[in-house]
Image (cartoon, rainbow, N blue to C red):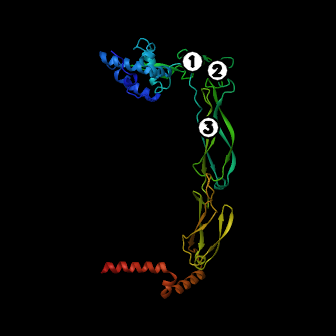
Amino acid sequence: MAQRDYYEVLGVSKDVSEAELKKAYRRLAMKYHPDRNPDDKKATENFKEAKEAFEILKDKEKRAAYDQFGHAGVSNQAGGGFGGGADINDIFGDVFGDIFGGGRRGGGPRVYRGDDLQYNLEISLEEAVSGTSTEIRIPSMVPCEVCDGSGAKRGTSPSTCSTCHGVGQVRMQQGFFSVQQTCPSCRGKGKVITDPCPKCRGQGRTQKEKKLSVKIPAGVDTGDKIRLSGEGESSDSGGPPGDLYVAIMVKAHPIFQRDGADLQCTVPINFATAAIGGELEVPTLDGRVKLKVPPGTQSEKVFRLRGKGVKPVRGGAVGDLMAKVRVETPVNLNKEQSDLLMQFHDAISGTHAQKHSPQAHSWLGGVKKFFDELRS
């Protein structure tokens, strides 16, 4: 019986990628594997056929020979079922190795990067707006100075793990899958320490306080982070250290609140200034500025002082200062002041109320209309 085309067997086109080739073979292997189809000779034959096709097409040289000469070009290289090629564990190691953490052979113990650290730094609004430099002290795990990070007592050295033979991983058989797992004896390090260092107790690392200088760029805000590369935890497997992230927290300010690039503040004024107008001194982060208040200014009126805000750290225009005036009612008046205020009240009441208090007059008119409609 003539052999079927390998591409046809796997259900792929001739320009199939390596990833798609593996995916197609995996699908067929799961479907026809003998463990899933006991006593099914047809399924076994299909599995052998798929395995042979995959063994040829996954190899670039064999695939090129097959594309040029067909089966004749690879007649002495095909796997021929379970006999001529790799065993079943090798086959599934190649196809599924990436799922379970890498191939079966070679390499050595895995090397991991050290952990990242975060330091919460509280700064003032002035420092956030203008930028600053500061020193911080952080506790961090660093290589042990006594054993140079090996974890073994001085004069000794770690020995190769007898369980994984220094690879750091062991292969476990689960049904027809061969699963690679971290070695339980050495925890993936590939080495075991029989005589640990007394200072670090075999960990290879000790805690030490580091002093670092941090430059805070102008315009930062709460939630921004500054990365200090390589200033995190050291690795316990010989890898590079992690990074340190300095998380910015801006303290509440007694005068200003920040809203993105803008600053906000509330300025109390007396009702005389609000009524007849005048000038106010308004604080900014650059110093005091004069604010002209027009006559008849109402409470909660917002004045915009352009360019008196913050220049964002990521670029963009400088924000503004939004100064909101709040008319303050006088308190603790003496009799003379109360009498003068009453005279003022009488002068603007009566026939003059609509002219001097238009909002109050309009509101009272609305109230009167509301009750008139209720009675009608």
Read off the residue under disc 3. Answer: 243
Residue 218 image label: none
Q: Earlier in the sequence, mark 1 or mark 2?
A: 2
Q: Horizontal and vertical percent for residue 267?
A: 60, 68
Specify the farthest residue to the front: 69
Q: CA distance from mark 3 to mark 1?
A: 28 Å
* Quarter of the C terminus within the rendering: bottom left
Q: Horizontal and vertical percent for residue 355?
A: 50, 84
266 is higher (above) or lower (below) than 59: below
Q: Is residue 179 visible?
A: no
Q: Residue at point 30% right, 15% down?
A: 41
Residue 152 image label: 2
Q: CA distance from mark 2 to mark 3?
A: 27 Å
Q: Horizontal and vertical percent for residue 324?
A: 57, 67
Front of the two marks 1 and 2? 1
Residue 258: image quadrant is: bottom right
Near-viewer residue (300 or 303): 303
Residue 166 image label: 1
User: At numbered mark 1, what does the secondary structure look like: helix, strand or loop?
Assistant: loop
**Amino acid type indicated by mark 3:** Asp
- Mark 2 burial class by Cα count in 10 Å: few <14, some 14-19, many 20+: many
Q: Residue at point 61% right, 63% down?
A: 320
Left or right side of 369 for 249: right
Residue 79: image quadrant is: top left
Specify the farthest residue to the top: 83
Near-viewer residue (91 or 225): 91
User: At numbered mark 3, what does the secondary structure look like: helix, strand or loop?
Assistant: loop
Q: Earlier in the sequence, mark 2 or mark 3?
A: 2
Near-viewer residue (170 or 198): 170
Q: Horizontal and vertical percent for residue 105?
A: 52, 19
Left or right side of 274 for 14: left
Q: Earlier in the sequence, mark 3 or mark 1?
A: 1
